[in-house]
Image (cartoon, rainbow, N blue to C red):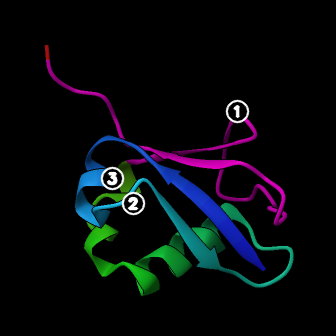
Amino acid sequence: MKIEVRLFAVARQLANQETIAVSCPESATIADLKQAIIEQLPELATILDHVRFAVNSDYADEKTQLSSTDEVACIPPVSGG
């Protein structure tokens, strides 16, 4: 299935795009999605251990199962002053 992921902050800068379409197996989890993102966009590998994912506007953990209709966001930590 294809999962569309919205990118924010440094993730968006590294990928040079606002959204990415990621191929994942059916009944994929956030952990599966992270691995698929690394395979598709290795430049994001350095930050994926530090980002939070939100699914349908709620923060999700690694075991959260995904469907192709989910709205997924990749949210890096906020810094600055």
Q: Which residue is mark 2?
A: 48
Q: Picture coordinates of residue 42 (x, y %)?
A: 32, 80
Which callout, 3 or 1, points at the residue further toward the start of the chain?
3
Answer left or right for 43 relative to 37. Answer: left
Quadrant that contains the N terminus: bottom right
Is 63 above or below relative to 59?
below
What's under tag 3, amino acid-wise? Answer: Arg
Quadrant that contains the C terminus: top left
Report, in whole angstroms, how far the alpha carbon at label 2 lies from the one at label 1. Answer: 19 Å
Q: Which residue is mark 3?
A: 12
Determine the secondary structure under disc 1: loop
Q: Which residue is mark 1?
A: 57
Determine the secondary structure under disc 2: helix
Give the residue drawn at x 54%, y 80%. 36
Give the residue drawn at x 28%, y 62%. 16
Q: Picture coordinates of residue 72 (x, y %)?
A: 65, 50
Is 76 above or below relative to 66?
above
Q: Which is nearer the eye, 38 or 63? A: 38
